[in-house]
Image (tube, helix red, strand yellow):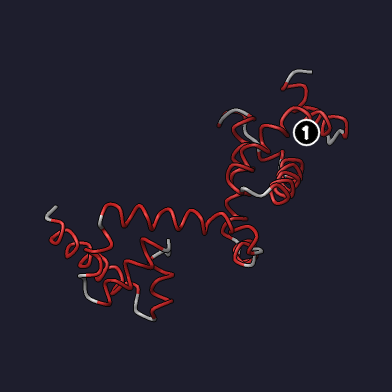
Amino acid sequence: MSQEELLQQIYKKDDRAFTLLYDMYSKSLFSVIYNLIRDHEEAEDILQETFVKIWKNIESYDESKGRFYTWILNISRNASIDRLRSKGFNNRQKNLSSDNFVHLLDESNKMNHKIDTIGIREFVKKLKPKCIQILDLLFFKGYTQQEASEELQIPLGTIKTQNRNCINDLRNFLKV
């Protein structure tokens, strides 16, 4: 069945067309979703939601605006991004078991060794205590500026300014 014939059947809400649509596109859409989400179960849920949205909103597809595959790809991508931004998803990620992070401890120790090897830690120690605290959160612990702002209870704009000033101080120490 050609894509045009398939679309005509989907417009008519033919169940067999839906099965064929799923068979044709599920693997490629799943891989796009999984690459964004990095969680197999979540990706399966989003894939299911994507096909429901395609089925319910097929009338909004306009062939003159682009290919069908691009349209369904955008639906899956947008659904993935919506899930990533959702509060529930973020909370689940924060509450993962510590078993998921054991490997990070080894990598962290390796990173500390690398930092010590190139001597950055000695230069960071020469900075003001507030700079040490900010750089530690932002660069060594991977906090965003917003998260560092909340952690240190300092306004976001102040964190940004102090971060920039601390980096400049570090550059001066390194003579870069």
Could you tell me residue 48's position as x and y percent? 76, 45
In the image, 23: left or right of 83?
right
Which residue is pictured at 46% across the width and 57% down the height? Answer: 108
Residue under numbered circle 1:
22
| Looking at the image, residue 133 lies above or below residue 45 | below
Q: Nearer the viewer, residue 25 or 137?
A: 137
Q: Nearer the viewer, residue 41 or 17?
A: 41
The crowding category of the residue bearing disc 1, from other C-alpha atoms within 10 Å (few below 14, some 14 to 19, many at least 20), is some
SS assignment at label 1: helix
Q: In the rendering, at what x and y percent does residue 49 appear?
A: 73, 48
Query: Where is the N terminus found, in terms of image quarters?
Result: top right
Is residue 119 depicted above or below 17 in this figure? below
Horizontally, is 84 left or right of 55 in the view?
left
Residue depicted at 20% across the width and 67% down the height: 165
Q: Hey, which quadrant is residue 126 in on the image?
A: bottom left
Choose between 93 and 66: the one closer to the eye. Answer: 93
Most extreme residue toward the bottom is: 153
The amino acid pointed to by label 1 is: Tyr
On the rendered structure, is 21 left or right of 30? right
Task: Residue 124: name its quadrant.
Answer: bottom left
Q: Say whether residue 111 is left or right of residue 24.
A: left
**How many numbered callouts?**
1
Across and down, in percent, residue 139 comes to 36, 60
- Depth check: 17 or 64 in front? 17
The residue located at (42%, 61%) in the rendering is 142
Residue 72, given in percent of the width and then of the height, sits at 65, 37
Q: Which residue reaches farthest right?
A: 15
**Vertical placement of 60 versus 9: above or below?**
below
